[in-house]
Amino acid sequence: GNSVTQMEGPVTLSEEAFLTINCTYTATGYPSLFWYVQYPGEGLQLLLKATKADDKGSNKGFEATYRKETTSFHLEKGSVQVSDSAVYFCALMSTGTASKLTFGTGTRLQVTL
Amino acid sequence: NAGVTQTPKFQVLKTGQSMTLQCAQDMNHNSMYWYRQDPGMGLRLIYYSASEGTTDKGEVPNGYNVSRLNKREFSLRLESAAPSQTSVYFCASSEYWGPRPQHFGDGTRLSIL
């Protein structure tokens, strides 16, 4: 079946540090890949997505590249801010399961001054 | 600018009580979803409605029922609440059934004693 594995958190960084959150997946077919962000007390918001191999999704300074050869979709940001503190979820949607999203367990990011 | 609205935001129940969680979206989306979020487990799909008039089981449907009341509204019912159903519940919607991003509500935090 489909699965998503994320690095365990929490990840604690100083402001302006470089961020990488690892995500690897197992899926049938050719999945679409997503990163969602959840701020405290709120629902999940779509951060970025990629629908085919070698696509790069980007938004708000975050980037992730769909790597089919390594089945990965790592999230990166060059310079994090305190306002980026949140929980980040990697997710996939497989053509074999239509609109059903499979989520990773989430990685909490805490950015300090 | 409401998007997906869930009510209530918080609820405490006793074991065996029943309750309905409400969800409404104002984006004219065709598909709607109910998830539960538990620590260390990401989000898991309970039920979904690909279009008005249809509902289907997700990954963890036991103990729940749903009703797609109309295109806007999708409710989740716990007939006899159990402590194992203590969780944060999220409703989501997407434009249509397929690889489209899902938009989430802010969640309902449910505790069952």
Image (spheres, rainbow, N blue to C red):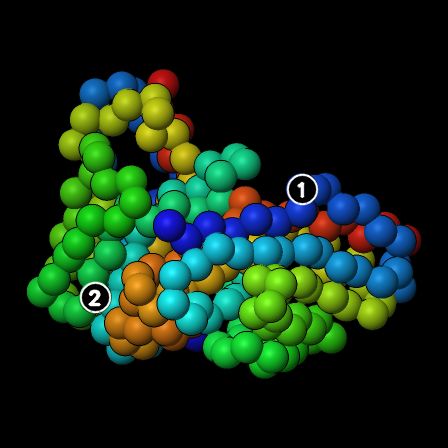
Asked if B63 appears above or below A107 in the picture, the reply is above
- In the rendered structure, the answer to whether residue B66 lies left or right of residue B40 reads left
Is disc 2 on the same chain as disc 1? no
Residue A50 visible in rendering: yes
Residue A97 pos. (x, y %): 30, 61
Task: Kindly identify the amino acid type of the residue bearing the numbered disc 2.
Answer: Ala
Q: Examine the rendered structure and indicate whether residue A39 appears above or below residue A35.
A: above
Q: Which mark is residue A8?
A: 1
Residue found at x 76% / y 59% = A20
Q: Nearer the viewer, residue B27 or A66?
A: A66
Q: Residue at the spot x=30%, y=45% of the render?
A: B59
Q: Residue at the spot x=50%, y=59% of the render?
A: A91
Would residue A43 be seen by someone viewing this image from the given angle?
A: no
User: For the residue carrying disc 2, how many other residues have a C-alpha within 10 Å: few (<14), some (14-19), or many (20+)?
Assistant: many
Q: Quadrant of residue A72?
A: bottom right
Give the image quarter of residue A28: bottom left
Question: The residue marked by circle 2 belongs to what chain?
Answer: B
- Name the spot of residue B63 as percent of width and height, x first: 21, 33
Residue B50 is tagged as 2
Label 2: which secondary element: loop
Q: Residues within 10 Å of mark 1 (few under 14, many from 20)?
A: few
Seen in the picture, residue B33 relative to A12 is either above or below; the reply is: below
Closest to the observer: B72 or A46?
A46
Residue B18 located left or right of residue A83: left
- Mark 1 element type: loop
Pinpoint residue B32: horizontal percent, then vertical percent: 27, 63
* Residue in the picture at 46% in, 50% down: A3
Q: Viewer-proximal residue, A29 or A60?
A: A29
Q: Nearer the viewer, mark 1 or mark 2?
A: 1
- Amino acid at dot 1: Glu
